[in-house]
Structure formats: C-alpha cells, structure tokens
Image: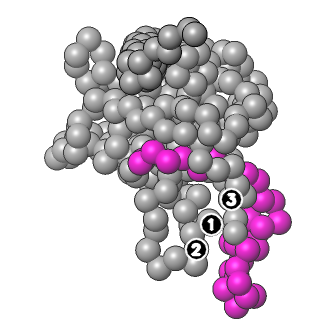
Amino acid sequence: MKPIGNPFSQATSLLLSLTINLNLSTTAYANELADTLHRIKPGIVGIGTFHATRSPSALLIGSGFIVGDGFHVLTNAHVIPDAIDYSRNESLAVFVRNFGKVEHRSAKKIAVDDQHDLAILKMTGQALTPLKLGDSSKVREGELYAFTGFPIGIVLGLYPVTHRGIISAISPIVIPAYSSRQLNADMVRRLQAAYSVFQLDATAYPGNSGSPLYDTQSGQVVGILNKVFVQKSKENLLSEPSGISYAIPIQYAKELLKAHDIHPSQ
C-alpha cells in the first residue's frame, strides 16, 4: 500500500504557496500603480483662483488634469467659481507643482457641459504632460481603479493624493422620487436625460472634484470624480449626504472635447 503523506504538512505547504503568490501579486500591483502614478502625476493640476494681494493669494477649489495639446484642462463645471473679480486682477488659475515649487497659470473657460458637470479650460505657460483617455463603455463593476487629486483643497497643500477602489456599481445619476411632491424642476430635467455614473467604494472629498479616475496599469482615464453634483441627484431624498463617491464616465468629456476640436491622447 502506498503511504499517505502527512495531511497537515500538505495543508501547510499549500497555505504557504498561496501566501507567497498573494504577496507577489500584491507587490506587483503596488509597483504597477507606482509606475503609472509616476507617469501621469505631472498632468494632474489644481483648479482655483489667484489674487496677488489677497491672503492667501491662491484659493484651491478642486482638481483637474491635462488633455490634448498640453494646454487644455478637464475638470468639473461646479469647480469653476460663479464670479471672478477680473476688475481687481483676480484670475481663474491652474496650479502646478514644478520642480518642487508651486506656480499658478492663468486660465480661461473654453467650454461647459452643464448636463454632465464638465468644463474645459485653457491655461497659459508651458505645455504639461497630457493624460490618455480610455473607453468608459468597457468599465465593469468589480474592476479596480485609482484616482489622484487634491482632497480638501489648500488645507493639505498642492500635493496630489491617490486613492484606489473598485467600481461598486454603475447606476443612473437620478433615482426617481417616491412621489411627485418630491420632484423639482431640476430633478425632472435630469430624469428626462438620465445617464449612468460610476459608484466607487473609495472615499473622495470635495477637493477631489475633477480628479481623473484611471486604469492602474495603462493610466488611461475612464472617468472624472464628481461628488457634489451627482449627490444632489442620487441622494436628494437623504437629509445628509452619504460618504459614497461617484465619477462621470469619460465618454461625455470626449464628446465635449470633440465638439471644440480638441484631440485627446488615446
């Protein structure tokens, strides 16, 4: 009769093998994200206003990223202030960390898509590294992505912060109200032109609005982080907003860029 090996020894060997493979996989993923982040971080910028005699002179409101020829910036429309006092030399600004120093570039608004809360800016100065745009129609629930931006604005300084998480759901931006009395004109308008957004299990903050959601391996952007705008639609029945984060699929930004003859990197 053939001797039977020690089952405890076999189980230990199997567990050890699984642990080693898991650690190798985790290390490979960490290195992959680190390499991707190193590539794309120069193209991630802050968005806000600048006034030389104000204290502080720089007001960081949200995030954005470079596309096209290196001068155009994609962000959320709600990140752009409603009023800028140009008569007092206040300017719309793109903030860039260049060789360890923060510099501001004056910018102007090129286009806005209010339905999808998107905006295109064009900045002055030298061109920056544009990010490549992916295909948001291929994004699946359960896939892992990362986003990089400036959470909580100027409080943490102009240091890009990266989070990662899975696509926990792909669902309509508007959830119908329980009764007609809960509907308002804005909700009706959005219900008539509803579209799906990405729901994430990673935490984003108001300053993250406009951050790119990207594939950790290729760095291709598949969405734009948006918390404020989407919550107003999806969570209109909640007395307090949840901690859920959302992103607008990049396909709508690609359509806006195309309409203004701006050609993003693929």
Q: Position of residue 238 (x, y in %)?
A: 52, 76
Q: Earlier in the sequence, mark 3 or mark 1?
A: 3
Calculate the distance from the C-alpha at mark 2 to the C-alpha at mark 3. Answer: 11 Å
Which residue type does callout 2 highlight? Answer: Asn
Tag 2, which secondary structure? loop
Q: Left of 98 or right of it: where is 117? A: right
Q: Earlier in the sequence, mark 2 or mark 3?
A: 3
Q: Which residue is pictured at 30% across the width and 21% down the height?
A: 97
Q: Position of residue 137 (x, y in %)?
A: 77, 35
Marker disc for residue 233: 1
Q: Position of residue 165 (x, y in %)?
A: 49, 39
Residue on which the image places disc 2: 236
Q: Which residue is pictured at 50% across the width and 48% down the height?
A: 201
Residues under numbered marks 3 and 1 in contact, where contact means CB atoms less than 8 Å apart: yes
- Residue 89 is drawn in which quadrant? top left
- Residue 74 is drawn in which quadrant? top right
In the rendered image, the residue lying farthest to the front is 1
Which residue type does callout 3 highlight? Answer: Ile
Q: Nearer the viewer, residue 129 or 233?
A: 233
Residues under numbered marks 1 and 2 in contact, where contact means CB atoms less than 8 Å apart: yes
Tag 1, which secondary structure? helix
Residue 200 falls within the magenta-colored stretch: yes
Q: Left of 250 or right of it: where is 153? A: left
The answer to whether residue 6 is visible is yes
Residue 64 falls within the magenta-colored stretch: no
Which residue type does callout 1 highlight? Answer: Ser
Residue on which the image places disc 3: 173
Q: Nearer the viewer, residue 253 or 165?
A: 165
**Vertical placement of 214 versus 184: above or below?**
above
Calculate the distance from the C-alpha at mark 1 to the C-alpha at mark 2. Answer: 6 Å
Give the magenta part as a residue range. 176-204
Q: Which residue is pictured at 38% across the width and 31% down the height?
A: 162
